[in-house]
Image (cartoon, helix red, strand yellow):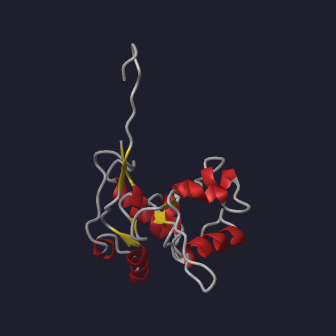
Amino acid sequence: RIEDEERRFNINNVPEEILDNIEILDFRTAEAILDRTRKNDESDAQPFVAVEELLFLHNMDEEVFVGENGQPGLRDIFTVYGDGKVNINTASRAVLMAIPDMDEDSIEVVLAFLSGPDQERNTPDDVMISSLATLQSELKLDPAVVSLLDRYCKTESEFYRIIGYSTRRGGRV
């Protein structure tokens, strides 16, 4: 299985306004993330090497990291890979909702467009956006919304995770 790592925000260079816009993330945890990832007068930046390191932050709750009651957790919103922009073609609703000043209706229009005719994500008829200008020309989104998406999104990814599964039978994998 291949997963696009840039479908999520890079925790090491995520803008503060994104952290402020994530409902499950409390102020102290957001401050701890910024303190660790930003260089200041007192210390050098210490980037996260793995998103699971968030679990070691003071006051981090496992339910906030993993998610609960069907809601996405921080592991579903953040990665440690990429340039900080998310791939709009593969980003989840939760990731797009973290964009400041984005309205839910515009996100639903984008996700419906990407889902293709069957309105199901991750199926063969999905549509890929090759240019964010498409959002304004084809979907007639407000230019302010397109500007926000342009600031935080892109249309291609460079980082992927390859996940392999194997079984052991008769002493062999």
What is the quadrant of residue 4 in the picture? Answer: bottom left
Q: Where is 147 relative to 129, above or below?
A: below
Q: Residue furthest top?
A: 170
List x then y, in percent, for residue 98. 54, 68
Q: Residue at x 40, y 57 (%)?
A: 5
Tell me the quadrant of the picture where the C terminus can be found.
top left
Q: Residue at x 52, y 68 (%)?
A: 47
Q: Residue furthest bottom?
A: 41
Q: Where is 21 relative to 111, above or below?
A: below
Tell me the quadrant of the picture where the N terminus can be found.
top left
List x then y, in percent, for residue 3. 38, 50
What is the quadrant of residue 17 in the picture? Answer: bottom right
List x then y, in percent, for residue 123. 33, 45
List x then y, in percent, for residue 54. 61, 59
The front one of 53 and 74 is 53
What is the quadrant of residue 20 in the picture? Answer: bottom right
The front one of 146 and 24 is 24
Residue 45 falls left or right of residue 139: right
